[in-house]
Each structure stands twice: as C-alpha cells, then as structure tokens.
Amino acid sequence: DAMVIQNPRYQVTQFGKPVTLSCSQTLNHNVMYWYQQKSSQAPKLLFHYYDKDFNNEADTPDNFQSRRPNTSFCFLDIRSPGLGDAAMYLCATSRPGRQGRSDGYTFGSGTRLTVV
Amino acid sequence: AQSVTQLGSHVSVSEGALVLLRCNYSSSVPPYLFWYVQYPNQGLQLLLKYTSAATLVKGINGFEAEFKKSETSFHLTKPSAHMSDAAEYFCAVSDPRGGGNKLTFGTGTQLKVEL
C-alpha cells in the first residue's frame, strides 16, 4: 500500500545532541510537511516542501531544519534539542488540488521524541 | 488568516448514543474543511472532507459532517457511537487558493465512549 513511513517511532535523545527524524513516502506527492504536536495540543506546522521549494513558518525556531533530497524522502533535523522540544513529530504529504479540489493530507504514524 | 474553533475539548457519550463534535471556522474565502481522527501514539487519519461540492459529506466509520455557511460550522456527527470511536478528533481548514495546501488545525476534541 502507498503510504507515509516515519522512522523511528520512538526516539530518545540527549539534551543538546543533534537528532534527525526521517520520513518517506510512496505516494509521489509533491508536498511534504513536518508538524510538531505536543501533548493534548493541535499539530503545529513547522515547515513544508513544495517539490524542492522550502517554506518555513515564521515562528519555527532556527533550531529546526529540514532536508528533502528527493521526492520520496524528507528529514527533520533538530540541531540542539531542548526539553521543550519533546513532542510527537508528524510527517504528512499532499498532492496539490486540481481544479480547486484538495485531497487533504496523508500522515505518517509519527515519531515521539523524548529529550533527556 | 483562517482558523477553526472546536467547542469542547472533551466529549463523553454512551455506546449507541449520538456523537456530535462541534467545529466552527473563520475564513475570508470559502474554505476547504476536514475532520481527522487520531488514536493514541498514531498519526492523523482523514475521516472526511468538504471541498465545495455537496454540503453533507459522508466519511469513513459512519461519520458525516454538514457544511453550513450561514453558521460557519462543520460539525461532525455519528448516529450511534461505538467503543472503537474513542479517540481524538481534529477539525482543520485550508485555503482553496493554491490547491488547498496548508492545513490549520483546531485544538482537538477527545471523545470518550462509555458502556
């Protein structure tokens, strides 16, 4: 089945130690997103790629970076994780709507990041 | 800017009872609207979407929602709750200009289903 896969499902990292989360998709969708979801909160968009074009949200901290080497893969890099960065990180993909229609997003299962 | 407001962060119903989860939107243009469900430690799964076609939208697992422009609402309903419906539900809105790419989520409603 075509899907969005996030690895690992659970990640423990040390305070200040760089960490990378990965996302891959078999849907061939143009757009890939990274969301941060803290406990009992709505997902918050960090950034997204439309093909190779990177779009950062204005309030995304510089500590968060992303790479998209090809259509299928997208990475989230946290350069110096703090305790406040502990969250679920969700990757999603979408295909831009044609003729004004949208298919919504397809989400991965998420990576739960713990910072110790 | 677009936004959605979900009234009630927690809703509890009895098994077999009607489920009603409320969502109101704010948008300067006719929006696209979505409902997603999230089970513990999982990603979000699309339940249904409104993209300017029929105002009554049917989704998976027996859920449906009605777009009411006059009330700026997109409430989610299910006639008879099942234990497996217990989860968190998110309403989301996107701007159809540019293909409706960016979703803005509400704060979520935790649905509890009791015997």
Image (cartoon, helix red, strand yellow):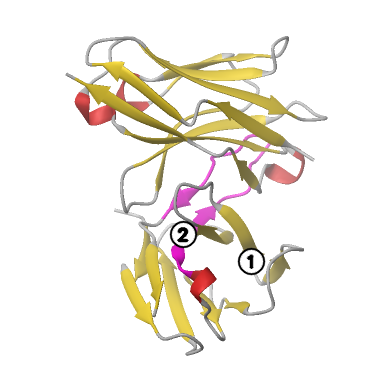
Which chain does tag 1 point to? Answer: A
Q: CA distance from mark 2 to mark 1?
A: 18 Å
Q: Nearer the viewer, mark 2 or mark 1?
A: 2
Residue positioned 71% across, 14% down in the render? B69
- Identify the residue position indicated by label 1 in the image: A51
Say if residue A8 shows up in the picture: no
Quadrant in the rendering for residue A9? bottom left
How many marks do you count on the picture? Answer: 2
Q: Quadrant of residue A61?
A: bottom right
Name the image quarter holding the N terminus of chain B: top right
Viewer can see residue A37: yes
Amino acid at circle 1 = Asp
Residue type at the position of mark 2? Leu
For residue A13, the mark is none
Residue picked out by circle 2? A90
Report the side of A106 relative to B15 (left or right): right
Query: Where is residue B54 drawn, in percent x and y?
Result: 58, 15
Q: Earlier in the sequence, mark 2 or mark 1?
A: 1
Q: Nearer the viewer, residue B107 or A51?
A: B107
Q: Is residue A94 above or below residue A70?
A: above
